[in-house]
Amino acid sequence: MRDLDLTTLRLFVAVCDTRNIARAAEQASIVGSAISKRLAQLEGTVGVQLLLRRRHGVEPTAAGQTLLEHAREMLATSQRIERAMAGYASGVRGDVRVLATASVLAESLADDVAEFLAQPAHRDIQISMDERISPDVVRGIREGSASLGICWDTADFGGLSTCAYRSDLLAVAVHPLHPLARKKSLKFAETLDYEQVSLPVSSAVNVMLARAAAAVGKRVLHRVVVTNFEAALRVVRANLAICVVPREVAEAYLEIYGLRCIPLDELWARRRFAICYRDGESLSAAARLLIAHLRRDD
């Protein structure tokens, strides 16, 4: 099969949307016969009939409907490429997709990205952020679905480039009436007699907590599993469970929810995050600028 022509696909989509060749031709400012010729060539290229000619217009066949879905995806990708490439002569432009863990997104990344985008030199850079657990962050970068990933630096980064980002401190959020509420600090083993609310069990921190519990011959008693820290702290507010949570996240809710936040006295409680990417040389100029803004070398 010969390469598909984007202009022809664009006209094909217009015909399918309007169900009328003449109307599509009017929108595209060309004659209807030119569209008909392109559509005939397209059907010859793919080897199947794409449109059914009706008395008052056209409609796609089953094969045409399938091509229509793929054509929309191809045209959308083409538009993203055009936006990313346009205007490099006048300044840095581009789209940067970032995968990050819930902790990173809840703590500092949004503020750091906002600060980056506020700089006049970065006004033509677009940044999107998606939440993933640590293994999926690394997998997404390896598979090329995003430019940058940010997660706990204990992840298996084999084959990826990394640099330091920020750090946080794990603590235990408890209701003020909970038996642990008067503690100044806690060993993790002290929490294991109480039910806990946690993020999905496959997340990096929960894997680590399970190992820490196993090391003292116990297991974590999961009462509730939630998908974000706000939901977890709501459960704590109801005094249904306690929660191991980054202190930097909990502090925003302590006064609102009336909770206590007790530091964990464990070496592993201080977590460091890393930015990962496949290859510095293949990164876009926009992605390199974002890394330079986010990285911490101290």
Image (tube, grey):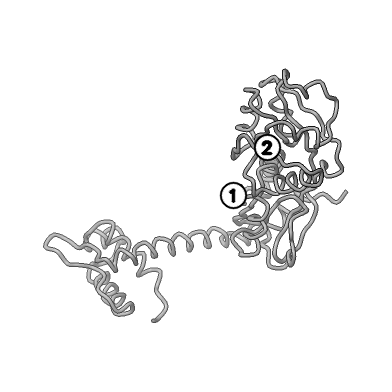
Q: Which amino acid does label 1 sit on?
A: Ser
Task: Report whether residue 276 is seen.
Answer: yes
Callout 2 secondary element: loop
The span from disc 1 to disc 2 (Cα, nearest Å) is 36 Å
Q: What residue type is labelled 2?
A: Leu
Identify residue for label 2: 221
Query: Residue sitting at 53 percent across and 62 percent down?
Result: 81
- Relative to residue 296, is residue 287 drawn left or right? left
Identify residue for label 1: 128
Place of residue 178 in the rendered image (x, y in percent of width and height, measured from the top left)? 73, 21
Place of residue 208 in the rendered image (x, y in percent of width and height, measured from the top left)? 75, 47
Q: How crowded is mark 2: few (under 14 residues within 10 Å), some or many (20 or more)?
A: some
Up/down of 128 relative to 90, above or below = above
Query: Residue sitting at 39 percent across and 81 percent down?
Result: 1
Q: Which is more toward the observer, 99 or 231? A: 231
Q: In which quarter of the image is residue 44?
A: bottom left
Query: Residue sitting at 76 percent across and 41 percent down?
Result: 218
